[in-house]
Amino acid sequence: MAGLAPIDRAKAQAELIIDLDALVANWRLLAARSAPARCAAVVKADAYGIGTEQAARSLFHAGCKIFFVAHVSEGVRVRAVTGAEAEIYVLNGLLSGVERLQSYLSYGLKPVLGSLHDLQLWSGSGIGASVPAALHVDTGMNRLGFGVDELLSLAGMVQTVRVDLLMSHFVSSELPKDGLNDQQIARFEKLRSAFPALAASMANSSALFLPQQPFFDLVRPGYALYGGNPTPGSKNPMRSVVTLRTPVLQIREIKAGESVGYNVQWTAKRKTKLATIGVGYADGMPRNLMATDQRAGGEAVVNDKLCPFAGRVSMDLTVLDVTDAGDVRPGTMVELLNARWGVDEMAERAGTIGYEILTNLSRRYHRIYKGG
């Protein structure tokens, strides 16, 4: 990345550069797309790996006033940087225990209730009469949430607590032609008609690009905020947020027929220049990015050239074939994630999803925040 100083090796062997201005720009794009619905931000899992406090603070000052987290501990962290004005919903339901329930009152957090167990706990605690909650209805995921008919049968009990939001979650919103999208919307509409006073929310990142525009009153983007592509198979409309870079540790040349890494999985087909870098699967680099004689592995950008991995990804080290990358020497910077080779490209090559790449970003990286 142009203009950045060399890595301070006293801190780390690799740097994760996080562009908070790009994060904010992504939120603003999605907010404009979904208006007049309000646009929240999902900042669970350490804001998808980029840092809860930094992400929540930047988004809050950009105008985002509603946040979703998975756990109470995450909600406490968001509250600390947003003050009293933000609305913070905790997605993963309630756990028994007076101290746990009291945390919702102490920090002004709103639980997302998704079962009879949750509803009974919240109603019986006495807190539910003063702290608003959301109702999560399952419309096809079969994970968390009330069943549609179950929630209808509990309408009387729902009236014993304060509720300000009705929500559900898409199963396949990244697939616009999947008929399940329409089925889920229809099921959700049935609940909306039964609870007309409640604000409604269903759209995640990919649902913001569905032709049905199921925006309702509130949308809840997550992945797209952090640069992930909400429209797989099409050009990514989002700005890249993360850049991961590290210096070359060592250069060596090998002859055709020599192997690289554990278990002789990759063999040079020509005289090859190799570069070893200090990032491996202990840093969140998927081991499945290994390159073998039968399959291509990961890639990284060196001197503006995409260079393939050679051999297995080790715990702390990865080897690149930099034969075609020009002048590469110890200290030459390697970019493992950037706007050209991003989380979606890495995930596809590793046989996983970009969400996993982001949330596995190592705490060993020296983090640099730009903008925000």
Image (cartoon, helix red, strand yellow):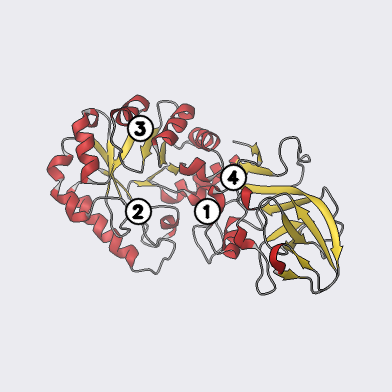
Residue 100 at what x, y percent from top left?
33, 31
In terms of image quadrants, where is residue 90? top left
**What is the number of the mark on residue 356?**
1
Mark 3 or 1, nearer chain start: 3
Instruction: Give the mark count.
Output: 4
Residue 228 showing in the rendered view: no
Is 133 placed above or below 336 here? above
Residue 40 at what x, y percent from top left?
42, 42
Tag 4 and tag 2, C-beta contact below 8 Å: no
Instruction: Give me the C-alpha separation between circle 3 and circle 1.
Output: 27 Å
Instruction: Give me the C-alpha separation between circle 3 and circle 2.
Output: 20 Å
Residue type at mark 1 is Glu
Please name the residue shown 40% across and 28% down the image: 85
Is 98 placed above or below 31 here? above
**Position of 356 compared to 275: left or right?**
left
Mark 4 or 3, nearer chain start: 4
Residue type at mark 4 is Ala
Mark 2 lies on a secondary structure that is loop
In front of the other: 160 or 29: 160
Query: In this figure, which residue is indicated by the disc labeled 3?
Result: 109
**Position of 17 compared to 30: left or right?**
right
Mark 4 lies on a secondary structure that is helix
**What is the number of the mark on residue 169?**
2
Please name the residue shown 68% across and 54% down the image: 336
In front of the other: 61 or 264: 264
Q: Nearer the viewer, mark 4 or mark 2?
A: 2
Q: Quadrant of the C terminus?
A: top right
Mark 4 or 2, nearer chain start: 4
Instruction: Give me the C-alpha separation between circle 4 and circle 2.
Output: 26 Å
Residue type at mark 3 is Leu
Residue 122 at what x, y percent from top left?
23, 35
